[in-house]
Amino acid sequence: MKLQQFLILVKGLKSVYTSNNFLPDEEAIKIWYELLKDIPYEILNLAIQKYMMSEVLSPKIANLRSLSAEIQQGQQNDWGSGWEQVLRAIRKYGMYEPKKALESMDEITRKSVERLGFKEICLSENIMTDRANFRMIYEELAERKKHDSTLSITLKNKMIEIQQQNEQKKLLEKSNK
């Protein structure tokens, strides 16, 4: 998104949220722009409109990033629909075709099942416990995905770079011992 486009959105925000504390100066606008510029104009515009129609208090950057991610990705399935995918895969593929079964699932469901073990779920005699464990894992992964989707690619890349540097330092420390 270009700065000129962002300034149009700021003008709209300031006309609705008239508090003097909301984006009080040019410096605040620059900071907001830096933290939102990776979002396409059309998506951020929709997110702002949605926010304006449903919230009384002025938005925070996190509110707009979260709404923008929601608009781009669409509504996420809940754990119940994920569990239905698991049961369907068990009925269709059984425990002897785990690869095909996992391929039939969405990303979060597949990762949840991989943690529990597809074969273990198929052979389980306590499906209620498996269902509860699946729910906990699914909700954790869905929350992490939702959070990650609000971060900019630049920030994600920097975080990965720092993690890799830390891992390299740990390896060096181990090899020096």
Image (cartoon, rainbow, N blue to C red):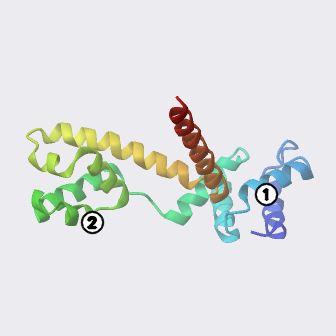
Q: Quadrant of residue 14?
A: bottom right
Given the image, on which type of amino acid does mark 2 rest?
Answer: Glu
- Which residue: 10% across, 60% down? 96
Residue 69 as seen in the image, left or right of residue 32: left
Q: Is residue 60 above or below residue 93?
A: above
Q: Please state if 164 lies on the left or on the right of 19 as rendered.
A: left
Instruction: Please tell me the numbered disc located at residue 33.
Output: 1
How many other residues sit within 10 Å of disc 2, few (<14), some (14-19) or many (≥20)? few
Circle 2 sits on which residue? 103
98 and 29: which one is in front? 98
Q: Are marks 1 and 2 in contact (CB under 8 Å)?
A: no
Depth-wise, is mark 1 or mark 2 nearer the camera? 2
In the rendered view, would you say 19 is above or below 15? above
- Could you tell me which residue is drawn at 56 percent across and 38 percent down? 172
Rendering coords of residue 70 (x, y %): 53, 59
Whether residue 151 is visible to the viewer of this picture, yes or no, is no
> Regarding mark 1 in the picture, which secondary structure is present there?
helix
Amino acid, disc 1: Tyr
Q: Position of residue 177 (x, y in %)?
A: 52, 28
At x 13%, y 64%, the residue is: 93
Which element type, helix, strand or loop, lies under badge 2? helix
Q: CA–CA distance between discs 1 and 2? A: 40 Å
The residue lying toward the viewer, choosing from 49 and 2, is 2
User: Can residue 122 be seen?
Assistant: yes
| Number of dots carrying numbers | 2
Task: Name the N-terminal-most of marks 1 and 2.
Answer: 1
The residue sitting at the front extreme is 176
